Amino acid sequence: MSTAPTEVSPRISRFDAESATAMTVDFLRRLGYEGSWLPMKVSLDGELYVVEMMFQKLSAKVQINSKTKEIREYEFQEGEGASNSLVSLVKSKGKIIFLVAAVSIAVVVVKLIGVF
């Protein structure tokens, strides 16, 4: 039986935007904010990851130190001020699609009637 030493490669701890987002979701759930949080923006400002999340009309902004993985600051906003461009864009796309469909149907009906 051989007792040759085995090499153990050190695990390199990577703290990236995905890790910061997962840590933010976990933090928000521990605070009691259950639900499907939607990540809106993650940015690195020096050593701080700034993670912005959205859930219904509630937005959260969490700052995490990338070296120590410590949550340095967090902030919540409620109401209309918490709305963002992505939610507005999705709503306006729906309205545009409805409008195009309605105009298309109107054109087909007018052609079937024989006005044009």
Image (spheres, helix red, strand yellow):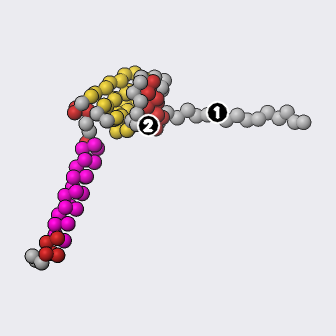
Residue 43 seen in the figure: no
Q: Quadrant of residue 105?
A: bottom left
Residue 85: which disc? none
In the rendered structure, which disc, 1 or 2, sits on the residue that comes first in sequence? 1
The amino acid type found where label 1 is placed reads: Pro
Q: How many marks?
A: 2
Q: Secondary structure at mark 1?
A: loop
* Span colored in magenta: 86-108
* Residue 77 relative to residue 8: left or right: left
Q: Secondary structure at mark 2?
A: helix
Is 41 part of what is drawn in magenta? no
The amino acid type found where label 2 is placed reads: Ala
Which residue is at a point 41% across and 30% down the rendered structure image? 34
Position in image of residue 102 (x %, y %): 19, 61
Real-space Cα separation, disc 1 to disc 2, in angstroms: 22 Å
Which residue reaches farthest front? 113
Q: Quadrant of residue 13?
A: top right
Which residue is at a point 52% across and 35% down the rendered structure image? 14
**Residue bearing the label numbered 2:** 17
Give the label, 1 or 2, closer to the camera. 2
* Residue 88 relative to residue 28: left or right: left
Position in image of residue 30 (x %, y %): 45, 24
**Residue bearing the label numbered 1:** 10
Residue 25 seen in the figure: yes
Q: Main secondary structure of the magenta part?
A: helix
Which residue reaches farthest right? 1
* Residue 111 relative to residue 14: left or right: left
Which residue reaches farthest left? 115
